[in-house]
Amino acid sequence: MATDVKPGKAANRHGGFVDGEWRTICASIVLAACRLACAGPLAPATEDAARLRATYQSLKPQLDHNAFHRRLYLDSRESPSTVTGEIYAVMDYPFATVDEALNDPAKSPANWCDVLILHPNIKYCRVRADGSGNMLTVNVSQKEAAEELASTYRLQFGYDAAVMGPGYFRVGLHADSGPLNTRDYQIVLEAVSLGSDRTFLHLTYAYSYGTLGRLAMKGYLATFGSGKVGFTNLAAPSAAQPEYVDGVRGLVERNTMRYYLAIDAWLGEPPGASGARLMQRLSRWFSASEQYPRQLHEIDRSQYMQMKQAEYQRQQTGQ
């Protein structure tokens, strides 16, 4: 069969395409593959950002009208083996501020320790790097009082690699085991930009337990946790008095709120010397917690401030 080729040119064809066409197509395929490879990690983040913004839109009535005196929605759920607390909140900080504080690989693990130590039951937190990444050593107490580290329970939290996209990030901490025969601790924070000066935040705090863990939790709730309640009101709308959830759900709601208030207090620190910033964080956390005395009041301000200053110093020296 005759082929129409100019003199001096070889008749190289690939599936009906001449060399120049083939090179163009190959280059296009390589470019498309590169874009797909580069976009791979971003695609889930983009979907997560869209999902979180949709959640913000659906929760706007609850965020605008609630008993928390801030744009916040709290939820919790309990199964036979897991309990989960979640907070969604509008933060009056630019997304870049939240992202740099809690998602910067160079600074965030240490920043998370400074956040966690504001919780009255967290007695110590230090970051160490190993072959698999950053680990946070966290000591937890059952009591909201000064305590020697030898009397506390030590958890090892892995710092999970962040998922990031335009105006979105998700970062997590996880520990395989915890006190009272609990396990699989998860602290997960995701955030999405709501414009130039606001960020929508979703905080999840969860852990699991088996039969022994459930029995141990019941023992704790009957002693240290006796009479303590969470935030969810189980009473009928017509009831004269609220009936707040108690038990394990009440416990996880209180701790989820404490961690959220710690994040807010840490982000809201003014510029200045480190000692002044610590005092501001402690004061902001305590003042915020006292808005919910039925659930969160444990000790007075001076006790909290003195206890936390000593614990922060211990945290800095590694003792």
Image: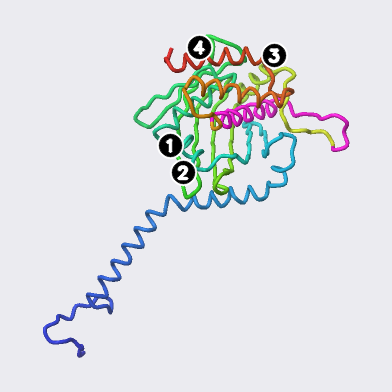
Residue behind mark 4: 149
Residue behind mark 2: 163
Crowdedness of circle 4 by 10 Å Cα count: few (<14), some, many (20+)?
some
The amino acid sitting under disc 4 is Leu
Q: Disc 1 or 4, which lies upstream in sequence?
A: 1
The amino acid sitting under disc 1 is Asp
Q: Which residues are magenta?
A: 237-266
Query: In this rendering, which labeled residue sits more in front, label 1 or label 2?
Result: 1
Mark 2 → mark 3, Cα distance in angstroms: 40 Å
Corner quadrant of residue 92: top right
Q: Residue 189 shows which numbered tag? A: none
Residue 182 seen in render: yes
Q: Disc 4 or 2, which lies upstream in sequence?
A: 4
Is 104 on the left-hand or right-hand side of 7? Answer: right
Q: Quadrant of the N terminus?
A: bottom left
Q: Are marks 4 and 3 in contact (CB under 8 Å)?
A: no
Query: In this rendering, which labeled residue sits more in front, label 1 or label 3?
Result: 1
**Who is closer to the viewer here, 220 or 60?**
60
Residue behind mark 3: 223
Crowdedness of circle 3 by 10 Å Cα count: few (<14), some, many (20+)?
few
